Image (cartoon, rainbow, N blue to C red):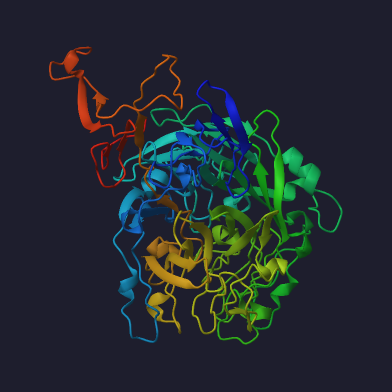
Amino acid sequence: ITVTAYGDAGDVISSTVTDAAGEYVLDVPNGTAVRLELDTLPNYLQPGPAGADSLTTVTFVTSPAENVNIGLANPAQYAQSSAETRVALPRFAYGAHDGPNAELATFLAYQEDDGSHAFLQGDDIDTTVYDASATVLAQQRETGAVWGTAYDRLHNQLLAAAFVKRHTDLGPTQNPTTIYRLDPDAQAVQEWLTLDPARANPHGTNVDWVEDFAVYAAVGVEGWGDLDLSDDFRTLYGIDLGTRTLVQIPIAEDGSAGLPTIIDPMPQLEAELVGSAAEQCPTLSDLRPFGLGMNDGVLFLGVVCSAASTVPADALPIQAPTKNVNRASSPGDVSKLRAYVFAWDGNVATPLFTKVLDFPLRYPRGCASYNQQADCGVNYPGEWLPWVNSFPYSSDGTSSPIGAKRFESFYPQPLVSNIEFYNGSMVLYLMDRFGHQVGPFTQSPYGEELDHVAAHSDILFACQRAEGWVMESAISGDEACRTGIRAYIRGEERANEYFAEDTYRARFALHGDVGFGAGVAIPGRETVIHAVFDPIYAVDGRGDTLFDGGLHWYSVADGHWRKSLRIYNNITGILPEEGIFSKANGLGDLVALTDIPPIEIGNRVWLDGNRDGIQSPLEPGIANVTVELLCPAVGPDGIAGNADDATVIAAAQTNEEGMYYFSSATGATTEHARYGLTLVSG
């Protein structure tokens, strides 16, 4: 950022650029009065509030002067206190949008302070302490299945994107490219945008929702992926999974959708990532974008190499995992599974995507299910597998522990589903595609009833370094990017998983990773939030903690679990009966309902001696001037343009330097600075 000192004649006395720490030094002769100005501010930064330790972007000093500090802020990184903040997220409901479950809630809001940090031991705690009252913002009849979410705080509207998931319908448009607008304070839903009105519904027609086999291969490759907003809240970004393109949608002044612009990253990604080398992705068709993240004006894109092309056409189905079957025999080349994060330069005509993270997905993971088996790492390993587009298990149900049912079916297939930032470091949410391809107690293609099925998603951390980002120790080996807490990996205790308590049942990690691949990092907090199944963190499992869905909070400083919120208490886990998806990715992406930052208006009345309209350092401020803040409106006479049209909101009297301020922030009101006003951005 350029800092310039101007003399009384408007001449440049000294100019410099701030260093990486934001510090600067100007060469100004002693006794010289200058006007300091900040120039070349990045688009994502705005002047911060004026105060004793932070001057304005145009300020006046006399040399020598030290600690002339000018605060800047990113409005997107503002959040009010946790007591005043809500989090909102989708919940999936079984069946047709206009069927028996039409009234089930599909979008809910909770207070950030809801939930409990009680650690469940035996029967000593009533599990209802983890429950809270929700505000229902939408029902199945209004949205159908949605996953990607964004909160437009300028217009106080939630945007939720249609999502393709087996056993649950699209919304009333029946189009996988629809984005719905929700009111965060009431149940009112509207179609906001349908990107491609001609796009077909992959579920087809006359669907038997307990089967819904037609949509199996479309999961993760049709509909919308993640949504995110620009730092100025005026542009929505989304991933169209069907075309694998980035969609840029301007938000009009009235909150409606503008004309979308399509940005295609795939030609560049193909040139950079696809090839025959060991660390390259085999084919372009294997590259699957999904997740987005915004940080300091830069949009980040999450991509996986799915390795689907390495699965032979005749390799499926395989025998269901049981006590006697090694699931490691799953087909495909697991060495080709990789995750990438790219930064987009913002150029639409000639976009440039710069790779900032690239790591293999063969890192050690907890058992998908311990299930009382010492060899769970053989029978129920949690490692990521190449994508498959048909049901992976055979019909030989006699080998299953409970007869014809598949007991605890897992087949983790990775998506980089969401990218959040915490003080510059990345929080990566990886979603298990299989959790959207199956549902508990639904049917296999062979007419058999499935039993419990569970997602096996993950939450990862990438530490910020001067040269970029480095993945947590479990993946990179970087000992500086770890928390050191104990984790159970394949029945062994290890200490290099950053968020190691994303489990159910602390003692044995009955499920090594309970995530749904969704979450949020709220600015200014010490924790990140993770959508999970079996959210109640306990020493031992208890019947009334099974099949539930909710949220975990983890400390970024030490990686530990901090508290849980239970969103649904799925008593039986039977999807067709209860309508809730239990452990099969039952919740969508989270968003924090944060306010716009406080607005400040000001700041100086001065004597313009030479009448040039430019504040010169020797032109003094004028004290004791009354400044009124007016709200334009038609006055009591009802006639626009008359003298009564403006309403006085507040009045201030300039101080000895001619300074005055009006602010919506809380503060100690003085004669020249008025705080706590109701000001609306527009």
Q: Position of residue 74 (x, y in %)?
A: 49, 43
As drawn, the residue found furthest toward the front would be 31
* Left or right: where 231 falls relative to 343: left
- Which quarter of the image is occupied by the N terminus? top right
- In the rendered image, the vertical position of residue 373 relative to residue 358, given as above or below: below
Would residue 531 appear left or right of 604 to someone viewing this image?
A: right
Q: Residue at x 52, y 74 (%)?
A: 503
As displayed, is residue 508 above or below residue 657? below
**For the point 72% across and 48% down, which residue is it?**
355
Residue 117 screen position, x and y as percent: 38, 73
Q: Can residue 637 be seen from the camera position used here?
A: yes
- Image label count: 0
Q: Identify the image quadrant of residue 118.
A: bottom left
Quick check: 259 above or below 71?
A: above
Quadrant in which the C terminus appears: top left
Give the residue displayed 80% in from the left and 42% down from the top.
271
On the question of residue 535 being in view, the answer is: no
The x and y percentages for residue 485 are 57, 77
Residue placed furthest toward the left: 637
Q: In the visual, does 151 lie left or right of 437?
A: left
User: Looking at the image, which residue sits at the far right?
Assistant: 276
Closer-to-camera residue (602/211): 602
Where residue 342 appears, as percent x and y from the top left, is 67, 47
Classify residue 624 as left or right of residue 603: left
